[in-house]
Amino acid sequence: MVGPTAPVFFYLSLAAPIVAAALAPMLHRWLGHKAGYVLALAPAFIFLHFAGYLGETAAGSDLVPGIAAGGRFLFSVPWVPSIGVGANFYVDGLSLVFAMLISGIGFFIVLYAGGYLKGHEHQGRFFSYILLFMAAMLGVVLADDVVTLFVYWELTSVTSFLLIGFDHRRQAARRAAIQALVVTGGGGLLLLAGLLLLSTVTGTLSVSAMLQMGDGVAASALYVPILLLVLGGAFTKSAQVPFHFWLPNAMEAPTPVSAYLHSATMVKAGVYLLMRLNPVLGDTLLWETILPVFGGATLLTGAILALRQTDLKLMLAYTTVASLGLLVALTGTSEAEIIKGAALYLVAHSLFKGALFMVAGTIDHEAGTRDLTKLGGLRAAMPITFAAALGAALSMGGLPPFLGFLAKEVMYHGTTHHPDVWMVLLTGVLILGNALMFAAGFTVALRPFLGPKVETPRHAHEGPFMLYAGPVTLASAGLLAGLLAHLTGVNIIGPLASAIVYRPVEVELHLWGGFNLALALSAVTLTLGALFYWKLACVRAVVASFLDLVGWGPDKGFDQFVGGLVGLSTRVTRVVQSGDLERYITLSFVFVAIVLVGGMSAFGEWTGILEAPDLTFWEWAVILMALVGIWAVLVATSRLTAIVSLGIQGFAVALIFMLFGAPDLSFTQFMVETLSVVILALVLTRLSLVKSDHRPFWEAMKDGAIAVAGGVGFAGLLLTATSRPFNARLSDFFSEYSLQVAHGRNIVNVIIVDFRGFDTMGEIAVVMVAGLSILALVRHRARGVTGTEPPREADAPTEGEA
Amino acid sequence: MNTVIFRTIAPYLAVLMALFSVFVLLRGHNEPGGGFIGGLIAASALAIYGIANGVPSVRRAIIFHPIHLAGFGLFLAVSAGIFSILIGVPFLTGIWIYPQVFGIELPLSTLLMFDTGVYFVVVGALASIALTLEERD
């Protein structure tokens, strides 16, 4: 049973890729690359489930309105109810289309990965990563709660990192992975701040509730910071200028990753977010300025740089950057007619770009190279791949009857609807960008296949079913969706556009709309595109010479940024962490002395604490004993004597505890003193120091002053604190309930193990970890392995001898 | 420190101290004592034995590596907490039973288990530090 009438299947859809990811390594061990067939069942199941939401009525019931009839569905699971965070999910036209793209394309990607990485020793791991990514991406587009959304958003960054760096033995792959993580992760932090501000302003964590508030956010004082922070997240994820550089570098990943994450799904997460928040943040002057400007700049930058490349994947990557720019620019208009074009282009792009990437991968896999200059005449050897490439390129170029054609018509129709200066400019940018992408698309789809046969590194032949199933299906889907324009419009594009503008939008699509302005602009685009294709060598030379002239790009800037950051942190660490134990201790005590003495002086707390206490003679005797211990420490000639003398003072304090009715404390103090003397003595024997501690006079004075100041500060603090009236509420509570509730007469022990048991658990964990660390440190030194900077104690003997 | 007298009495002293530490642990709920103090006493016992007779004999005597004892202690303490969850009360709530052993009512509780865990963590962590420092290599 599928569709929204069975919520359990919705949760199963969320869990299915995770379960599949867990099983993947095992299945790969049993079935080899054929595990792809089994694992692809997970996305297939998800796709079928979400297909049940389409139409006028949802599958399984005539009473539940489907997405086409304006149906919206909320699924809630409590997560952290105390702060209102829920694992809540929301399905409307926008999230549904994304979910179907993710699962539908994901199905073919899993198959494709089965063929593409056949025989790779870590193919099972690869399946796991890509399925985990699928789970994360589904979460991003379905999440209703902003915290849930953010968690899934970060998961896509993390899984993308793992996938880009999949071939981690190559330095380029590692660099690309780190770069993508830094850029998208950094953007994620901005997004988190933006979302939290947004939820403060709206008073809700639910996106669907925010949607209902209309222009409330745009009128608030925090609108500008919210917008900029959210855009920071969306622009980094969707590779907008000037953050576009990570996306082409991400092509270091195996091709299934490029086809899936870096064209069809993940990079669209930013676009998704903008579309999702359009009703909340959009329709303002700022929104309608920033988005079209950055989107347009990205469109042109990406499209121009694409023509410069000779690597098939890089070429596609730059056109992806361009397409994302186009989507951002269109979304930024907040104009329903133009949004329809964005909705169409979104679907069309996912289909044709996914297909083209897989084609590029298949060529690479079968011919051994994806360099355009080394490819040609493959049409006879790879006819099926060629057909798929052609179908995808026709959609990308915007030729009828493909979906890409409809997208182009509708966007031109929208931008020429109410012509003003901005719209004319935008239309011009769109025409130029589309023409450049037309040229790039056909370069990828035609150049390797046409012309005379070129000798390739591998003897090229048609790839296996797993490799061509995806491109053929996706390219056909682009054709079919175009041919069935009316159905596509009503069932998919209409609900999608309605969700973006948050009011019902009628979408009537026809392949033939008569002779109008949009058709004329299409003709201009095609002519221009054909011209670029024809003069490709010329365009490439111009772009290359321009780039050489500039000589600096954001990619180089990223390296400089990271290098500078590492240099800065090294310098800061050198200042803060000198590695000199003496300096650490001096700093700590000086700080304590300043805070205590200075603080008490500032608040005038010294008065009235210097009264002579009323003590018996044996109490005075114990205090005298402590003083004798301290005096012995000061005059001791050897370090060992000093440590033992310190023990005398400690025992005296333990006696004081005993005299004043704290046997547990006293008991512990005795043991701690004994053990610390023993352990300190042992440490001394290992450190091989000189026997006595000779300091220059001024150093002894300085250390003495710090010690006295710290001691006076602590004594003053304790005296002041105990001179206040004693609040007995806690002691009364514990003495009353200790026996009654916890069955123990020793209040101290009952507090430790029962009332405050959780604290104690944390404390013993700390003791355990401290023990482990000291053990490791001592062993480390014992083996003669020292760090870069040996501690000063190790140098002491040589100093003493000198 | 390595006098004949010390070396002769140290093993007996250590055994007495170890026994005393268990006594202190068990009486802790009602009289001064408890896992923390007991653990400290036991750690001192091991340290004294080690100083007098060498670390290898201590390691032989306690069979397990002291840091394993500490790990076991933490496990015991956390298990005592989880036991409460299994019964359906909040984490670390004290559970008491009063079985009759040889006709005497013996109060047992997850608190005792928890305190024993504290004992083992303290003795394990401190003994592993002390023994490692005592070892001359």
Image (tube, rainbow, N blue to C red):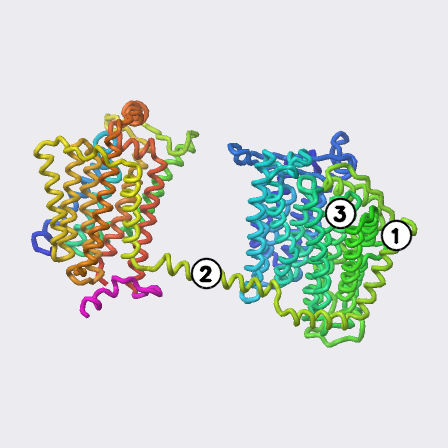
Task: Give the residue type that dot 1 points to.
Answer: Leu
Q: Residues within 10 Å of mark 1 (few under 14, many from 20)?
A: some
The numbered disc on residue A568 is 2
Spatial CA span between label 1 and label 3: 21 Å
Q: Is residue B74 left or right of A39 when viewed as pictured?
A: left
Residue A507 position within the rendered picture, expressed as x and y whole percent measured from the top left: 82, 42
Foreground residue, A407 or A78? A407
Residue B125 position within the rendered picture, expressed as x and y whole percent measured from the top left: 28, 48
The numbered disc on residue A613 is none
Spatial CA span between label 2 and label 3: 45 Å
Q: Residues within 10 Å of mark 3 (few under 14, many from 20)?
A: many
Which one is in front in this view, the residue at disc 1 or the one at disc 3? 1
* Quarter of the image that includes the C terminus of chain B: bottom left
Foreground residue, A713 or A485? A713
| Residue underneath mark 3 | A343
Residue A756 position within the rendered picture, expressed as x and y whole percent measured from the top left: 34, 33
Spatial CA span between label 1 and label 2: 57 Å
Q: Earlier in the sequence, mark 2 or mark 3?
A: 3
Residues behind callouts 1 and 3 on a single chain: yes
Chain of the residue that carries numbered disc 1 in the rendered image: A
